[in-house]
Image (cartoon, rainbow, N blue to C red):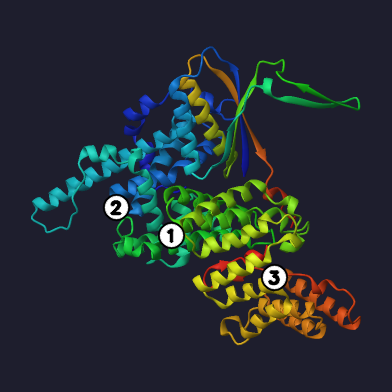
Amino acid sequence: MTATDPDQATDPGQATDPDQATGRDQATGPDRVAGSGQAGDPDGATRRTIEAVWRIESARIIAGLARLVQDVGLAEELAQDALVVALEQWPRAGVPPNPGGWLVSTAKHRAIDLLRRRTTYQRKLRELGREIESRSEPTDPDLAAVLDDGQIDDDLLRLVFTACHPVLPTEGRVALTLRLLGGLRTDEIARAFLVPESTVGQRITRAKRTLAAKRVPFELPARTELADRLASVFEVIYLVFNEGYSATTGDDWMRPTLCAEALRLGRILARLMPQQAEVHGLLALMEIQASRIRARTGPSGEPILLPDQDRRLWDRLLIRRGLEALDRAEALGIGPYTLQAAIAACHARARSADQTDWVRIAALYRVLVHVSPSPIVELNRAVAVGMASGPADGLEIVDELADEPVLASYPLLPAVRGDLLGRLGRYDEARQEFERAAELTRNARERKLFLDRAAEAAAAAAGAGRHSRAGNNTTPGSIDSASGRTRVVDPTAG
Amino acid sequence: MRYLALLRATRITSPPPPGLMEAIMQLGEEATAAGALLDTGGLAPSAEGARMQVSAGKLSVTDGPFAETKETISYALYEVRAKEEAVEWTSRFMQLHRDLWEGWEGEGEVLRVYGPEDFAPQS
């Protein structure tokens, strides 16, 4: 953790902060860590407790402070200062019985001190006759009330919309969101995205600077721009989710954490904006997709496609939560995330692959094509139609996509085509398509899968008409979405 | 990571005070809003439950109540990034009992539930 002002950690004024003194119970404080932590052992249990409390509380604290100081960067620094004080004091004095409240009040005092200093400074400037721009300064009662619970939900929402503000590049939004709302450290974010820590640090610094330079206000978006701003928030969260979900190689232990973090953000958001259909749609989509995580890779990390997954390994609790979220979404309205969730739900409800309601899935894709048209959604529809009403109908749709520039080097186009051709008994053409798919993919595991399918098709061509696995498999992989920016995992692909 | 928190009462000297339930609901709301609480439930006394056992090659079923005085009274399922977070939420839950229910004693337990991360391929 970095504090902006290390001196403040040992500020003697903090040790006698009245709020802290009344909040701390010496009899119970140390008890909370007894048996696992030693007083004065900052690397031990107390430190981990502090980090846990920080993860629980930091977003709320930063959000409340940001309203006060109107600057998320500064708010984060003030909150970090409170964390540093905790790291300094709790190992000695024990964890206070209300650790969250302790952090809030410490951070609040830091902010008030800062604003008082600023106010004094500005008054002095004014006395000197300087022209300065100043917004109305809050009065003391405002300051005292600022971090009280009443407005905290609005503050959190403001923080979400600010961190995901469209003036920021996508990667800046992602880093800032994970940092301010997820409470992740810079090195954790770097590890999760397989980039150097300094890169993430720069992204965060630059994002904060951009927000300040462009004078992005810490406020809720006006109704007229809400849809755009929401889309930006959803994009960030789903991007984080997919960054974790599409990592099938399993060599990075942080990636499941990214899925969990995106889910957590989605759950928080669903509470904050219960009237927005697509919040629940996005959450439903993530819950249902996450329910399959355990089933979608084999013992050596190989991807297991949806039709081949052992559905007993699906997480029933996440499916239940996903279906509940989908109900809420559908009651409020239908958008692209809700439609994708509805498709994912069709799979979740099917007890075996051959019980899948492909007719419904094909119909949902038809609606999705209208709501959020893209060649990739259309390709997914072709898969569904191929399953619902036969490979010839699916092939018809795929063939219309042949000239789409977006799909020119997209391996799943030939893969889907190969699959449909194989099911029509046109094994030689199917083999060629799978070979082309293998050439196009940049993922080694996917390449092997396509080459296996090509070999199966070749064997089927040689054995003319003998039953082949090439004929009854659906198409794999993760796909890129309409926007071309968000990676979207095809709900039909597992 | 997912953790199951179990709460047991070991000493109850009075009926639950009126404010406790409200405080518990409030805390549950907070944990849900923080994206941490997946599921929660209260458990009826063991008199309404049963216990199964296989011993010496024989399966037996015993109806409650069971002899010991500890009753498991509730569970909560958390999705968090570290054990300490589950401990923190459960500590807050127990703190409410301590603060609001005179004479109440009990114990909490936090158990990690295996998740996808435990089935990740070895690489």
Above or below residue A374? Residue B103 is above
Q: Callout 1: helix, strand or loop?
A: helix
Above or below residue A389? Residue A430 is below
Q: Callout 2: helix, strand or loop?
A: loop
- Name the subunit of mark 2: A
Q: Which residue is mark 2?
A: A70
Residue A446 place in picture, x, y as percent: 72, 71
Residue A484 place in picture, x, y as percent: 53, 74
Residue B39 place in picture, x, y as percent: 58, 39
Front residue of this view, candidates B9 and A240: B9
For the point 33% across and 49% down, the residue is: A66
Rounded to the nearest angstrom, the CA distance separating label 3 from label 2 is 54 Å
Is residue A440 visible from the viewing direction of this image? no
Q: Callout 3: helix, strand or loop?
A: helix
B52 on left or right of A268: right
Circle count: 3
Residue A257, label in figure = none
Label located before the other in sequence (3 or 2): 2
For the point 32% across and 28% down, the residue is: A18
Residue A204, label in figure = 1
- Name the amino acid type tagged 1: Ile
Label 2: few (<14), some or many (≥20) within 10 Å? some
Above or below residue B80? Residue A448 is below
Give the label, 3 or 2, closer to the camera. Answer: 3
Q: Which residue is mark 3?
A: A388
For the point 53% across and 26% down, the residue is: B94
Label 3: few (<14), some or many (≥20) within 10 Å? some
Residue B11 place in picture, x, y as percent: 58, 15
